Image (cartoon, rainbow, N blue to C red):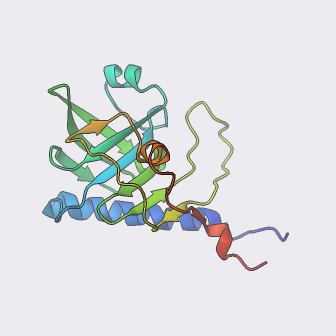
Amino acid sequence: MPEDRIRYDILAQEALRGVMRKVLQEVARTGMPGNHHFFITFLTDAPGVRISSNLKERYPEQMTIVLQYQFWDLKVDEKGFEVVLSFADTPEKLEIPFAAVRGFYDPSVNFELEFDVKSDEADEEHTVAPATLHTEPKAEAATDESATEETPEAEAEEGDGKGAEVVSLDAFRKK
């Protein structure tokens, strides 16, 4: 296979992260529209992630948050976002770089993005697997008002077995 000197995999991943960034910027500006809500899964040990030591202890590798009814002070910039959520009636500020996000899911419209992310402890070599886009129907995930321990993927696997079909960007490459 010829060498990809353009690095389409990196370009595609950056473009899909741009979708997530644009959605969060709009929500920060105008509020959550309609029934939309987001499950955002991120690596807690990725560079730039800032969460309390209590949350880091509870979620040493990865965490899924829900932005739906009760979130405050959502701020978004080119590199990431910050938000305040309530955990056991205690407000916690989270700062999450987009590079740390593994998944973005809006169950109201069955839209999902998944990213391969290396943790802080992983090999620092710059290799990026392509992001995947899910738009097929998926088992509805239970929502909470602030945060959840179960990821939407785990709940879909526990359901009726009819999860979303993963469509890799590789499927669109000419053979």
Q: Residue at x 14, y 27 (%)?
A: 89
Q: Quadrant of the image for the C terminus?
A: bottom right
Classify 1 as above or below 75: below
Number of marks drawn: 0
Q: To which quarter of the image does residue 77 belong?
A: bottom left
Q: Nearer the viewer, residue 30 or 124?
A: 30
Q: Quadrant of the image for the N terminus?
A: bottom right
Q: Is residue 161 left or right of residue 151?
A: right
Q: Residue furthest front?
A: 160
Q: Nearer the viewer, residue 125 or 12?
A: 12
Q: To which quarter of the image does residue 129 belong?
A: bottom right
Q: To which quarter of the image does residue 106 belong?
A: bottom left
Q: Residue at x 50, y 46 (%)?
A: 157
Classify 92 as above or below 65: above
Q: Residue at x 50, y 65 (%)?
A: 133
Q: Residue furthest right?
A: 1
Q: Is residue 49 visible?
A: yes
Q: Is residue 132 left or right of residue 112?
A: right
Q: Is residue 8 visible?
A: no
Q: Residue at x 24, y 43 (%)?
A: 83
Q: Position of residue 146 (x, y in %)?
A: 22, 39
Q: Position of residue 169 (x, y in %)?
A: 62, 68
Q: Is residue 62 left or right of residue 70?
A: right
